[in-house]
Image: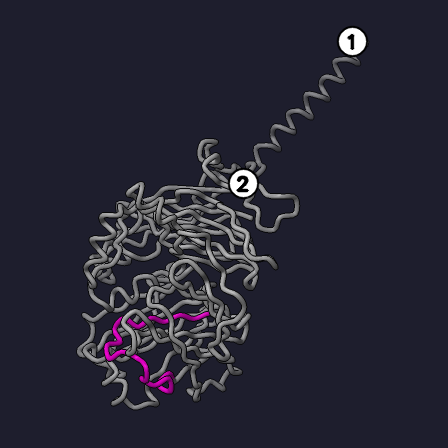
Amino acid sequence: MRREKYRIWAVILAFSCLGLTGGCTRVPEPKTMLLPIEETEQGVALEGEEGDRYAVRKIYSREYSSLWYGGYTAFLPGMDEHRVCLAERDTEGLRIQTMDYRYGFYDTGSFAAGELMDALALPASWGWGSQDERNMEKEFFSPNGKYLLYQRGDLSHIGNKLYLLNLETEKEELLLDGDEAKRSVEDFMILTAWSRDASTLCYGFVPRNTGVWNTSKKDTLVLYYLDLKTGEVVNRLNYSYAGTAGKADDLQSARLYIDRSGDKILTALVSDSAYEKEEICIDLFLQDIPEPGMETEGVVIPQRMRCIKEALFYLDAESQRVYASYAGDMIQCIDANNAEYVEKPLELEPYKGIWDFCVLDGGQAYITAEYDRNYAEGAGVYEQDICLYTVTESGAARRVLYQNAGCVIRLQYDPVYRRILAETGEPYTIEKMEEERKNEDSYIQWDENRKILVLEF
């Protein structure tokens, strides 16, 4: 009997050892970095009603030291669930780091880009000042953090060169050559734009003023669309058919936006208006990507509209619509086929102002980074809340997802894994904001102290 008991205990002990041994090879359980209780009480919505499609289930955050310039340095890779990419400063100048945030931001792969950037004569810190640099500051990295886009003038005689660098393969590609195209830097600038999913890059030379536009050969004002998966130019747009009517003489503050969905490409070329100082002129181009080998520079007559100068834009090629913030307290939906407003605008609550926004599920919901003007003025600090607006028949229901996020530099939405990334900087004081606004040539220059927030639905 005693031997039988020993035999039973031996079997139990053996299975226990096997369990412990097997446990050593398992992937560790996910560690959700939730906010402290005191922050949750300030208005962070972690849970919603049962079946709520837009309830935030988990929140992750991390502080980091970025490049010191006005652009973006935090990214959602797009293909990897629970991962983010950071362009982070280190002893070598710059490191592109991919992390799984479930495990306390576990490093899954780093690329020390400092030496490579030195070899390319690209500094890890910028004192961005020229208009050309400002035009590209937010396109320097692709939205998934995989590519580096930059231009150089030290290798040219009359015009700049545009390069694309794959940070994973270190392969560099020359996209535009100002010398070869006879585009002098005095007359032409380079504009670029990424699609939100980083699948497509648009780029081309744009005249610096309407005089250059009108005297240039119309068949040479072209934008190119590069498919990053195939490495081929899948489309070209002769934008000269937009004409200069309604545009201000000075085009140097022009901006370019694109979005792609399947074989549809939606492009917006934005410039200052010649009629009103506080307005902008928008040319909308809606195109179908041709079959391989059938790419042309055919005529595409744009849809023309005007909008308030401070408007932010969100292009949706799938629904063929453009969303624009208006007067800081509403978002308008525009049909790209006729440049007309559709539906009712999304109106924010009183005294709210939009800093950035994303559109979810074809306009069923919106994520905004907004601030309460009265609160900001009273506190003397410029901070935003991250809010959700869900559209209903009676209007829009508002929910605060994250309160006092600092200054939101960028919002990025991943529709595949249903998550929001907010890249934030240190709060600006009201005095500093007013001082910068007095100088027309000034713009917000974020420092290297940043924070990322990842909100999962």
* Residue ID for mark 2: 46
In the image, residue 382 above or below residue 357: above
Dot 2 falls on a residue whose secondary structure is loop
Please report the residue visible at 76 percent of the width from the left and 18 percent of the height from the top.
Answer: 8
Say which amino acid is labelled 1. Answer: Arg
* Residue 127 point in image, percent of width and height: 20, 57
Above or below, comparing residue 129 to residue 201 in the picture: above
Task: Determine whether, in the image, residue 157 is placed left or right of residue 275.
Answer: left
Is 262 within the magenta? no
Q: Is residue 388 visible?
A: yes
Instruction: Report the magenta residues as a range.
Output: 239-259
Relative vertical location of residue 383 with respect to residue 443 in this rendering, above or below: above
Could you tell me how far apart the alpha carbons at marks 1 and 2 are, in whole angstroms? 56 Å
Which of the 4 image quarters holds residue 223? bottom left
Q: Are marks 1 and 2 in contact (CB under 8 Å)?
A: no
Q: Point out which mark residue 264 bears.
A: none
The residue carrying pointer 2 sits among few (fewer than 14), some (14 to 19) or many (20 or more) residues within 10 Å by Cα, namely some
Q: State left or right for residue 123 relative to residue 414.
A: left
Placement of 150 over or under 89, stated as above or below: below
Q: Toward the viewer: 247 or 397?
A: 397
Residue 2's tag is: 1
Between 149 and 22, the one lying in front of the other is 149
Q: Which one is earlier in the sequence, the residue at label 1 or at label 2? A: 1
Residue positioned 24% across, 60% down in the render: 122
Say if residue 199 shows up in the picture: no
